[in-house]
Image (spheres, helix red, strand yellow):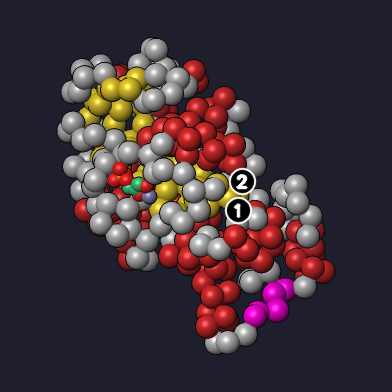
C-alpha cells in the first residue's frame, strides 16, 4: 500500500479509536467509508478480486471504477483502531455501477450500511464535491434527543444546538438534518439519507445515530462531535433542572456574519 493511501487509513483508525472512547461505538456500532480512488496506484488497480461480485442494491452511475475503504460488517471500531485492514477492506465498483468486488487486503464483507454510504459518495462525486469520507456513528446525546418528536424538526433542533455554544454554529454551519426512523441497512434509509445530505453535512437518524460527510474522516468526525457536544450541554443543563436560555438570536447572527458562514438558514 502506498504512503498516501496508508495515511488515509491511519486517519480512519485514529477516528475509530475516538468513537470507541466516546462510547459511540458499542460492539460493531457505526461504520466508515472513504473514497480512496485518488490514492489507488497502478499496482493496486491490477489486483484481482478476492470476492465474487456483490450487489450494492442500487445503481450508482458516478461510482464506476471507484475504490472505497469500508469498515467490515460486524467489525468493532475498537479493533479497527488497531487493525484497520483486518476489520475493513478496499472495494472496487464494477462497470455496471450496481455491484462491487473486494480487492484488499482480506475478504472482509463491507458494512451493512453500504447502500447509504455509497449513495452519498455517488452524490458527492456527481456534484464535484471535495468530500471523500462518510461516517455513521451512535452519539449518545443526539440519539437520546431523537426519541421525541419535539426534536425531530431539523430547523428547531439546529437552532437549539447552535444556541448552546458559539463554536457549534461556526463549525457545523449547515446544522443537522433529520431522517425519520427506517430499518438499518435498508434502501429506504439510504434514499432518505441522501435527500438530507444534499442540504446538511450531518444527518440524524431517528432513534439510531448520525451520518456525517467531510473532506476526510477527521472532518466528518469533528462535525459530529461539535453537534453532539451541543446536545450534551443542553442535556446537562436540563439535568440540573432548568431549560437553558441559549444564545440570543443577535449573538448567533453576529457569528454568522463575522465568520461569513455558508448557511441557507439565517438566525
Ligand atoms: P455494520 O457492523 O454492518 O457496519 O453495522 C453497524 C451499524 O451501526 C448499523 O447501523
Ligand atoms: Zn448504526
Cβ atoms at labels 1 and 2 below 8 Å apart: yes
In which quadrant will I find the C terminus? bottom right
Residue 239 against residue 125 in the figure, above or below: below
Q: Residue furthest front?
A: 149
Q: Earlier in the sequence, mark 1 or mark 2?
A: 1
Q: Quadrant of residue 209?
A: bottom left
Q: Residue furthest right?
A: 250
State the extent of the magenta-drawn residues as a range. 243-247
Alpha-carbon span between mark 1 and mark 2: 6 Å
In which quadrant will I find the N terminus? top left
- Residue 228 location (% of width, % of height): 51, 64
Report crowding for label 1: few under 14, some 14 to 19, many 20 or more residues within 10 A (C-alpha): many
Q: Quadrant of residue 110?
A: top left
Report crowding for label 2: few under 14, some 14 to 19, many 20 or more residues within 10 A (C-alpha): many
Foreground residue, 6 or 28? 28
Question: Residue at 55% of width from left, 87% of height from top?
Answer: 240
- Residue 143 location (% of width, % of height): 47, 61
Question: Residue at 57% of width from left, 25% of height from top?
Answer: 126
What secondary structure is the magenta-colored segment mainly? loop
Q: Secondary structure at mark 1?
A: strand
Q: Secondary structure at mark 2?
A: loop
- Residue 116 location (% of width, % of height): 45, 36
Q: Residue furthest bottom?
A: 240
Which residue is tagged 2?
200
Which residue is tagged 1?
176
Magenta span contains residue 69: no
Visible residue check, residue 148 = yes
Foreground residue, 143 or 31? 143
Amino acid at each position: 500500500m502506498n504512503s498516501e493511501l496508508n495515511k488515509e487509513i491511519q486517519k480512519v483508525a485514529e477516528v475509530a479509536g475516538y468513537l470507541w472512547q466516546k462510547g459511540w461505538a458499542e460492539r460493531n456500532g457505526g461504520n466508515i467509508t472513504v473514497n480512496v480512488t485518488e490514492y489507488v496506484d497502478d499496482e493496486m488497480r491490477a489486483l484481482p478480486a478476492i470476492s465474487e461480485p456483490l450487489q450494492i442494491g442500487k445503481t450508482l452511475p458516478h461510482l464506476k471504477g471507484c475504490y472505497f475503504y469500508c469498515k467490515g460488517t460486524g467489525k468493532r471500531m475498537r479493533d479497527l483502531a488497531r487493525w484497520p485492514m483486518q476489520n475493513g477492506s478496499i472495494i472496487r465498483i464494477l462497470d455496471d455501477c450496481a455491484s462491487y468486488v473486494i480487492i484488499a487486503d482480506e475478504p472482509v464483507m463491507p458494512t451493512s450500511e453500504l447502500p447509504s454510504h455509497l449513495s452519498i459518495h455517488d452524490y458527492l462525486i456527481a456534484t464535484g464535491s471535495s468530500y471523500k469520507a462518510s461516517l455513521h456513528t451512535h452519539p449518545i446525546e443526539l440519539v437520546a434527543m431523537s426519541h421525541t418528536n419535539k426534536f425531530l424538526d431539523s430547523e428547531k433542533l439546529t437552532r437549539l444546538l447552535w444556541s448552546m455554544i458559539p463554536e457549534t454554529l461556526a463549525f457545523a454551519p449547515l446544522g443537522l438534518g433529520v431522517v425519520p426512523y427506517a430499518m438499518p441497512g435498508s434502501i429506504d434509509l439510504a434514499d432518505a439519507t441522501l435527500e438530507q445530505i444534499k442540504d446538511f453535512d450531518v444527518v440524524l437518524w431517528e432513534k439510531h445515530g448520525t451520518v456525517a460527510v467531510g473532506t476526510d474522516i477527521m472532518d466528518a468526525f469533528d462535525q459530529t462531535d461539535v453537534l453532539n457536544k451541543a446536545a450534551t450541554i443542553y442535556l446537562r443543563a436540563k439535568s440540573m433542572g432548568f431549560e437553558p436560555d441559549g444564545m440570543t438570536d443577535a449573538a448567533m447572527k453576529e457569528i454568522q456574519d463575522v465568520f461569513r458562514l455558508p448557511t441557507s438558514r439565517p438566525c
